[in-house]
């Protein structure tokens, strides 16, 4: 006799239609999305998600960081819920699936269970974490970081974007600052489905990544100060070129990352040049160096060499330099029980799979600190993400959501 729920499968068309519907909100300029955190578009996406959840009979919780918790009751109201979700905010030139797949696959689980009148012992809560991307407001995974006790809420509320608007004010302005205390909720487990955002699964022809670990991350914001002056009439020996200093530092970042190949990576994605005028030598540059590795000692070595090397470059060029750590977390080992639930689901469903270390950071990396947590990954085309051309197949989305559902339902306990 097959175990209850053994043949559970999501509705692929319904999931795909919801992904495409959500993608209409905060469209990008090249087919992707620009639905940055606590913008009006973020608010619209939240409202659509809430309407879908309420149509499934779920009750919506909202905490003081704006994280959304849509709850489906279990048969045991005292049992801690199983949480499942990800994030609806996107990069400025983001794709349609980064984060969104994890939230809407969570909703699809509820839709499927409702359709089949299947109950679970533990309640299930589908979650949309505020500001996972950390682009408009650094650091990444902000709300899940407050939830896990990493950051204070007051500090998070005070973070300013490039226009000087505070996070807390913007969250209130879009009407999604809830009353619930952040982190008060206790979880039986947390599962997150996410596209890989890298090339491994597709290149190996694997449907599912069983995420055992997440690599660690370090964000250092560097400010180099020189002297604005005329690009034409300032003799070369007199120049204090902050832009040239940055270029040398970025060359150093690349060299440091390569020195720890193949597991370490390094680059700067955020660069502000002042005054950013064609005929003015930059007097100030502000940029963020992103260093990552699955190995904490490697991250610490890269940070130390970056700081020492950048200081040396700037001293030799007569430039000022300041360093500020603006984000980071240690490498993550996910919960063995939750990882086994994911692997067992992939095996039972007959999806090809392999263990995987997540190259990107995710809310699960922080939630793993406060609850048993693991992730499911599906491939994405050419491993491309944080690019409007991000793409997945319906089959990959379906496989990921099926495995997520089985891991969640197994953990929540089917009531027959
Ligand atoms: O930066 C990251 O890894 C994530 O996409 N926020
Ligand atoms: Mn993401
Ligand atoms: Mn992302």
Image (cartoon, rainbow, N blue to C red):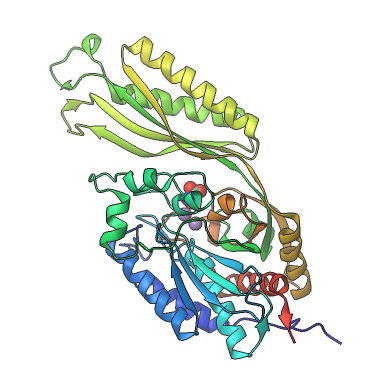
Q: Is residue 21 visible?
A: no
Residue closer to the observer: 174 or 249: 174
Where is residue 177? Give x, y as percent.
Answer: 35, 61
- Residue at 36% in and 33% down: 287
- Residue at 29% in and 29% down: 285
- Residue at 62% in and 30% down: 298
Q: Is residue 317 visible?
A: yes
Instruction: Tally the marks.
Output: 0
- Residue 309 relative to residue 335: left or right: left
- Residue 132 relative to residue 331: left or right: left
Q: Quadrant of the C terminus?
A: bottom right
Q: Quadrant of the N terminus?
A: bottom right
- Residue at 53% in and 54% down: 363
Q: Quadrant of residue 159?
A: top left
Where is residue 60? Give x, y as percent.
Answer: 45, 74
Residue closer to the observer: 49 or 206: 49
């Amino acid at each position: 006799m097959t175990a209850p729920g053994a043949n559970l499968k999501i509705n692929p068309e319904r999931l795909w239609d919801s992904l495409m519907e959500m993608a209409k909100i905060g469209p990008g300029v090249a087919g992707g999305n620009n639905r940055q955190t606590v913008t009006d578009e973020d608010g619209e996406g939240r409202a659509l998600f809430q309407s879908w959840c309420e149509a499934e009979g779920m009750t919506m919780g909202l905490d003081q960081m704006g994280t959304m918790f849509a709850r489906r009751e279990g048969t045991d109201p005292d049992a801690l819920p199983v949480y499942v979700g990800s994030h609806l905010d996107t990069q400025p030139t983001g794709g349609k699936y980064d984060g969104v797949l994890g939230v809407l696959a969570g909703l699809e689980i509820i839709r499927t269970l409702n359709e089949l009148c299947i109950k679970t012992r533990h309640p299930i809560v589908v979650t949309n974490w505020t500001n996972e991307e950390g682009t408009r407001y650094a650091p990444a995974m902000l709300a899940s970081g407050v939830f896990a006790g990493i950051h204070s809420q007051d500090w998070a509320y005070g973070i300013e974007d490039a226009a000087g608007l505070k996070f807390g004010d913007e969250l209130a302005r879009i009407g999604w600052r809830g009353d619930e205390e952040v982190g008060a909720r206790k979880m039986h487990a947390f599962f997150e489905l996410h596209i890989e955002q890298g090339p491994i699964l597709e290149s190996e022809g694997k449907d599912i990544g069983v995420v055992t670990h997440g690599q660690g991350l370090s964000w250092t914001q560097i400010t180099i100060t020189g002297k604005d002056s005329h690009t034409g009439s300032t003799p070369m020996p007199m120049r204090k070129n902050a832009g040239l200093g940055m270029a040398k530092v970025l060359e150093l970042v690349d060299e440091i990352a390569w020195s720890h190949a193949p597991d370490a990576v390094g680059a700067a994605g955020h660069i502000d040049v002042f005054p950013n005028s064609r005929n003015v030598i930059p007097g100030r540059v502000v940029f963020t160096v992103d260093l990552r590795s699955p190995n904490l000692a490697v991250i610490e070595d890269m940070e130390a060499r970056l700081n020492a090397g950048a200081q040396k470059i700037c001293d030799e060029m007569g430039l000022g330099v300041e360093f500020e750590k603006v984000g980071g977390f240690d490498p993550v080992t996910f919960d063995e029980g939750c990882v086994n639930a994911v692997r067992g689901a992939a095996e039972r469903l007959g999806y090809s799979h392999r263990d995987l270390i997540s190259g990107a950071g995710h809310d699960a990396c922080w939630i793993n600190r406060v609850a048993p947590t693991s992730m499911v990954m599906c491939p994405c085309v050419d491993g491309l993400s944080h690019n409007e051309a991000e793409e997945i197949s319906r089959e990959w989305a379906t496989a990921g959501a099926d495995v997520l559902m089985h891991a969640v339902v197994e953990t929540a306990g089917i009531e027959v």
